[in-house]
Image (spheres, rainbow, N blue to C red):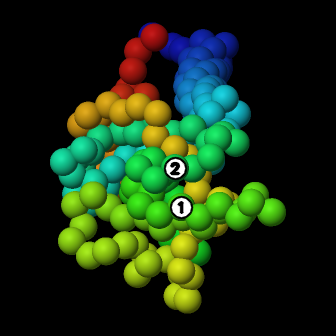
């Protein structure tokens, strides 16, 4: 049985088209996730509209692995608000409660001192940049407006256990390569 060059070319082009289709599909999934994230940023006004509680510092109110939904608005920050903030040198937002707030009436600026609910020490000044005594409004990325318990454990697992991340990525890659459509 002989294979004609036409048949061989059609088989080669089929695999090429299938590979291109799979790459485009993966690109669309990534682009959709990015658009969803940017949409959430626009709607909530927060740089980080969804954050995962990474430590036990906010227990018993929020446990490690809880997901918090954040919103940033022009509303004043009050003592007791759950805030996410970033400080110089830390790219991952920190989630703690505001324990002191000082508003400057003439400028509208605000100084905020925070603390994790489960932390035994008085405040978070050791987390701030050296010499920084409080947070300014530009450090704050959002105020908590809701939460889902335990859902963030997937993120924690993938971050803390790189082997799990590599196995998951490898499995998904094999699934894409060997899937039949």
Image quadrant in which you'd find residue 67: top left
Nearest to the observer: residue 138 or residue 175: 138
What residue is rendered at 47% in x and 63% in y?
100
What residue is rendered at 53% in x and 61% in y?
101
Mark 2: few, some, or many residues within 10 Å (few <14, many ≥20)? Answer: some
Q: In the displayed structure, does residue 99 sit left or right of residue 20?
A: left
Image quadrant in which you'd find residue 109: bottom right
In this orientation, does residue 87 appear? yes
Relative to 165, is 20 above or below? Answer: above
Q: Which residue is mark 1?
A: 101
Q: Position of residue 171 (x, y in %)?
A: 31, 37
Which disc, if any, is residue 165?
A: none
- Residue farthest toward the right in the current orientation of the protein: 106
Indicate the quadrant containing the C terminus: top left, top right, bottom left or bottom right. Answer: top left
Indicate the quadrant containing the N terminus: top left, top right, bottom left or bottom right. Answer: top left
Q: Position of residue 174 (x, y in %)?
A: 36, 35
Q: In the displayed structure, does residue 79 sit left or right of residue 62?
A: right
Which disc, if any, is residue 78?
A: 2
Q: In the displayed structure, does residue 163 sit left or right of residue 42?
A: left
Q: Position of residue 158 (x, y in %)?
A: 31, 50
- Residue farthest toward the front in the current orientation of the protein: 105
How far apart are the alpha carbons under marks 1 and 2?
Answer: 6 Å
Mark 1: few, some, or many residues within 10 Å (few <14, many ≥20)? Answer: some
Contact flag, marks 1 and 2 (Cβ < 8 Å):
yes
- Earlier residue among tags 1 and 2: 2
């Amino acid at each position: 049985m002989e294979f004609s060059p036409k048949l061989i070319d059609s088989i080669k082009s089929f695999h090429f088209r299938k590979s291109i289709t799979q790459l485009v599909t993966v690109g669309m999934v990534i682009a959709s996730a990015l658009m969803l994230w940017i949409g959430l940023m626009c709607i909530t006004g927060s740089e980080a509209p969804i954050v995962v509680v990474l430590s036990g510092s906010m227990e018993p109110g929020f446990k490690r692995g809880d997901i918090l939904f954040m919103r940033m608005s022009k509303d004043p920050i009050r003592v007791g608000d759950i805030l996410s903030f970033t400080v110089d040198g830390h790219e991952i937002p920190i989630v703690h409660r505001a324990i002191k707030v000082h508003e400057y009436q003439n400028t509208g600026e605000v100084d905020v001192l925070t603390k994790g609910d489960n932390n035994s020490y008085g405040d978070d000044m050791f987390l701030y940049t050296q010499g920084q005594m409080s947070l300014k409004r530009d450090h704050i990325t959002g105020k908590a407006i809701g939460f889902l318990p335990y859902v963030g454990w997937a993120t924690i697992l993938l971050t803390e256990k790189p082997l799990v991340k590599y196995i998951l990525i490898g499995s998904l890659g094999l699934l894409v390569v060997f899937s039949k459509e």
